[in-house]
Amino acid sequence: MKGEPLLEVTDLVKHFPIKSGIVVDREVARVRAVDGVSFTLHEGETLGLVGESGCGKSTLCRAILQLVTPTSGSVRFEGEELVGRSRRDLRPLRREMQMVFQDPFASLNPRKRIGQIIGDPLELHGLASGAQLKRQVHELLDRVGLQAEHVNRYPHEFSGGQRQRIGIARALALRPKLIIADEPVSALDVSVQAQIVNLLEELQDEFGLSYLFVAHDLGVVRHVSDRVAVMYLGKIVEHSHSDGLYQHPLHPYSHALLSAVPIPDPRRNVARERTTLEGDVPSPIDPPAACRFHTRCVFATDVCRTEEPPLAELEPGHFAACHHPRF
């Protein structure tokens, strides 16, 4: 295990109310985007987070950073509770936690030049101004593979990969300890993805960063992660060290995700065991009772429909929430 606990998330819940009414709004349902998530991230570690679209990964990231207010639960950063704090109280901690967003264009202000986008955090936190600010912006651009002359350009003048480098430079400006990367390569070409992933790894080694790395591409997650957590309908259903999960997944959902990843060797690809998921992902407004995966699981039995399985340690360092794990 790398370092001391940096981020501790305990029973984190984020529900979005659905309201209806003409004169008086009343709550008629809730979207259970995140529904009781717990994990720990250590210093210098990368935790990969995978799952289908709509399972709550992005909402979890924003709830951790308090960009959306959690419904309940606890988020502790270096031992300090974040949930319930005012924006003023959170401001000093904002320097230590930054985010790289999925869409490298939508996350950059189109009306600001690149020098302003990267330099604004330094000015707002009183860390640099004038010639010192200009020098630091140039250093950040150079560190992410861009040139000093780019400071006067606008986001639309760059490619997708270059814009993501700008987003990384902005996140790096305050020298944070934690960077949450919300699918930072999913909108990029395959050749550019490798460049961005390598850049993130280099920065981690250089600055001692910790990452919460969200992605759809299981190959990318395996490459960058020390541990991997699998999320389904607002809950973590399995987490383990990266090699353990990829070589021997215990939860049927994890097994299905991994079986969908193509293997370069055609013979191995045809011969391997596959798990095919049936049906669509249930609505997070009305998720299935007990085990949320039972409606799509070929191994489901009556106990799966009546009792929710706890996230338990089934092998050393390997946790899964399943009544019928695939040993």
Image (cartoon, rainbow, N blue to C red):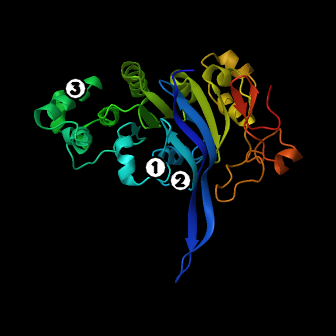
Q: In the picture shown, does residue 302 fall above or below 222?
A: below
Per the model, the C-alpha gap separating discs 3 and 1 is 29 Å
Residue 117: % across, % down: 24, 42
Kindly identify which residue carries mark 1: 66
Question: Where is 214 relative to 108, above or below?
Answer: above
Front-most of 122 and 181? Answer: 122
The mark that comes first in sequence, 3 or 1, is 1
> Outermost residue, bottom direction?
23
> Percent from the top left, x then y, of residue 276?
73, 36
- Can you tell which mark lies on residue 139? 3
Query: Residue at the location (42% across, 34% down)?
Result: 179
Q: CA distance from mark 3 to mark 2?
A: 36 Å
Q: Is residue 172 left or right of residue 115?
A: right
Task: Estimate the x, y position of residue 134 in percent, counting from the top left.
Answer: 15, 33
Q: Does 272 sit above or below residue 287?
A: above
Q: Is residue 262 visible?
A: yes
Camera-nearest label, 3 or 2: 2
Identity of the residue furthest to the left in this view: 131
Looking at the picture, which amino acid does disc 2 mark? Pro
Gap in Å between the C-alphas at discs 2 and 1?
7 Å
Quarter of the figure with residue 171 = top left
Image quadrant occupied by the N terminus: top right
Q: Is residue 184 visible?
A: no
Which residue in the protein does label 2 denote? 70
Q: Helix, strand, or loop for circle 2?
A: loop
Q: Residue at x 21, y 46 (%)?
A: 112
Q: Is residue 225 left or right of residue 322?
A: left
- Disc 1 is placed on an element classified as loop
